[in-house]
Image (cartoon, rainbow, N blue to C red):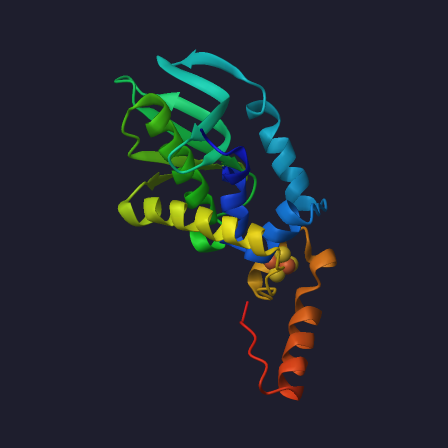
Amino acid sequence: MPDPDRYVLISALQHYAYCPRQFALIHIEQTFEENLYTLRGQRVHEKVNIPENERIAGIRVERALPLWSHRLELTGIADVVEFLADGTPYPVEYKSGSRKPRDADDLQLCAQALCLEEMLNRAVPAGAIFHAASKRRREVQFDDELRSRVSETAQHIRQLILTGILPHPVADERCRDCSLIETCMPHAVRDFHRSSQLNNPFLVLEDG
Ligand code: SF4
């Protein structure tokens, strides 16, 4: 019998891969802040958040398709899944901005593919990220390394939820576009930890 408490949201994988602290602030501490990027993201998702299906140039297109994997204990919603002429599912994730560091979007898309494979018993070798700003698609191949990272990241997330410890801030270029920067205070927190470490050389702190 599946344990619903163990299921990880596919969107949480993307947050964790981008920054573990961002994941913890959103999914453990329930923090959410609007910024230009979140507002753009909402606009981009307005159409694909409505469940519907249609045929475009002979291709079946499903929007807001619920996804799950009992094997990996994942759940979520695909923005768009196209079904190619031979029936192969092809997930497409909509993003308002440009490519994210750490391939966080690729990981999210691969998790969708793994769910589709389990649900439909069909191989899903590739999908695409649609960047609304450039109106271009970037195809992602789901290789073994990316597939392994999905289950590893889900395990890290479960461990983090169990410990409830807020990770240190990454305090790098990722923070500039992060809507949580005001709440997170990455540079102030990093400096505080560094000064604590200097004052207590026996205290070992992880870098972000
Ligand atoms: S501001 Fe930086 S450290 Fe804080 S959650 Fe965002 S990306 Fe992570």
Classify residue 71 by image quadrant.
top left
In the image, what residue occupies the spot 43% across and 18% down?
Answer: 61
Quarter of image, res 42: top right
Q: Is residue 9 visible?
A: no
How many labels, in total? 0
User: Quadrant location of the C terminus?
Assistant: bottom right
Residue beneath the point at 46% across and 36% down? 74
Q: Residue at x 55, y 56 (%)?
A: 20
Q: Is residue 144 above or below residue 204?
A: above
Residue 2 position (above or below residue 87): below
Q: Which quadrant of the figure contains the N terminus?
A: top left
- Rendered-image quarter of ligand 1: bottom right
Q: Position of residue 80 (x, y in %)?
A: 47, 26
Q: Position of residue 114 (x, y in %)?
A: 36, 34
Q: Is residue 183 above or below residue 61?
A: below
Using the image as rendered, state which of residue 201 and residue 15 is in the foreground: 201
Residue 58 in sight from this viewpoint: yes
Residue 84 image offset from top left, x and y in percent: 31, 20
Relative horizontal placement of residue 97, taking residue 60 as reference (left or right): right
Residue at the spot 35% in from the left edge and 41% down from the top edge: 140
**Please, is residue 133 above or below residue 179 in the view?**
above
Tell me which corner region of the image, top left, top right, bottom left or bottom right, holds residue 60: top left
Determine the residue located farthest toward the front in the rendered image: 1
Residue in the foreground of this view, choosing between 86 and 121: 121
Q: Position of residue 127 (x, y in %)?
A: 36, 34
